[in-house]
Image (cartoon, coloured by chain):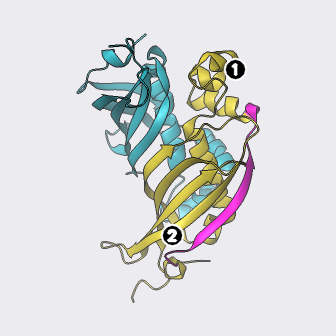
Chain colours: A yellow, B cyan
Amino acid sequence: MRYFEDIEVGTVEEFGDYHVTEEEILEFAEQYDPQPFHTDEDAANESAFGELVASGWHTAAISMRMLVDNHLLEQAGMGGRGADELRWQQPVTPGDTLSLRTEVLDKHRSESDPRRGYVDNAVEVLNQDGDVVLSYTVTGMIERRNPDE
Amino acid sequence: MRYFEDIEVGTVEEFGDYHVTEEEILEFAEQYDPQPFHTDEDAANESAFGELVASGWHTAAISMRMLVDNHLLEQAGMGGRGADELRWQQPVTPGDTLSLRTEVLDKHRSESDPRRGYVDNAVEVLNQDGDVVLSYTVTGMIERRNPDE
């Protein structure tokens, strides 16, 4: 298990391989973002996008799945506090294969609770062409191994 | 249909009624955020949360659904550009009923494309006790009715 003390600022990681199908784009959008350019191919063709595109919140959810699969389960995580500067830079379309690039930007102890610390990560979601489709920073809470030090 | 010109800065709206079930929390988390405190009641009881809680990205997706149901379909929307200051302020747990409060913070024309404008909205997701569980600002793109003016 990795604790707050084990996180090193500046660490860069690249990982993940998530294939996005039309079926999954439609399923997410019908439940959470039923705008026509996310749920209906004909309407999407007529829209500003010109084709069916994934909900931006779907892309964010996919990035979370890649984070969890790749290292969050090995961390003594206590949930997320927030995210900033979330930018949907390019559309995600059926058939795209996404991956992640993360960088540990900063970490600091909680002032109110000695058992936890905060870690700021920059996250970029890339498609198979290397384009950044989504970027954001996220602050996670993580247990300290030695709260008394 | 509401266009960029129809949006009034300062407009506040409260709406929505979204009942969050344990089944939906588990379903979203198993697909997109399989951390034990989102997918396993026993593990969640032992976690810092002390109970099963929804993924933060799930709460964001639910807020999108309420936005779409309540007014996005009446707008000439062209998708979202980004979100800022996303803060998961309180956990969302099975049985919660969520609603939204939105405020139009600002709007401005695109400098590069006369057909579109940008609208900044503050979004707060509240639970049945009136606690803000998630807050963020989001910038949406919207068509201008009169691109030539």
Disc 1, SS: helix
At 60% from the left and 43% from the top, the residue drawn is A59
Q: Nearer the viewer, residue A149 or B136?
A: B136
Residue hosting label 1: A41
Q: Amino acid at mark 2?
A: Val
Judged left or right of residue A83, residue A16 is: right
- Residue A16 falls within the magenta-colored stretch: yes
Task: Name above or below for residue B54 compared with residue A34.
Answer: below
Residue hosting label 2: A104
Q: CA distance from mark 2 to mark 1?
A: 38 Å
Residue lying furthest bottom: A149
At 73% from the left and 34% from the top, the residue drawn is A94
Judged left or right of residue B133, residue A29 is: right
Residue lying furthest left: B10
- Please report the bounds of the magenta region as a residue range: A8-23
Q: Amino acid at mark 1?
A: Glu
Disc 2, SS: strand
Q: To which quarter of the image does residue A12 belong?
A: bottom right
The chain letter under disc 1 is A
Q: Residues within 10 Å of mark 1 (few under 14, many from 20)?
A: some
Q: To which quarter of the image does residue B11 belong?
A: top left
User: Where is residue A145 drawn, in percent x and y?
Assistant: 50, 83
At 49% from the left and 17% from the top, the residue drawn is B73
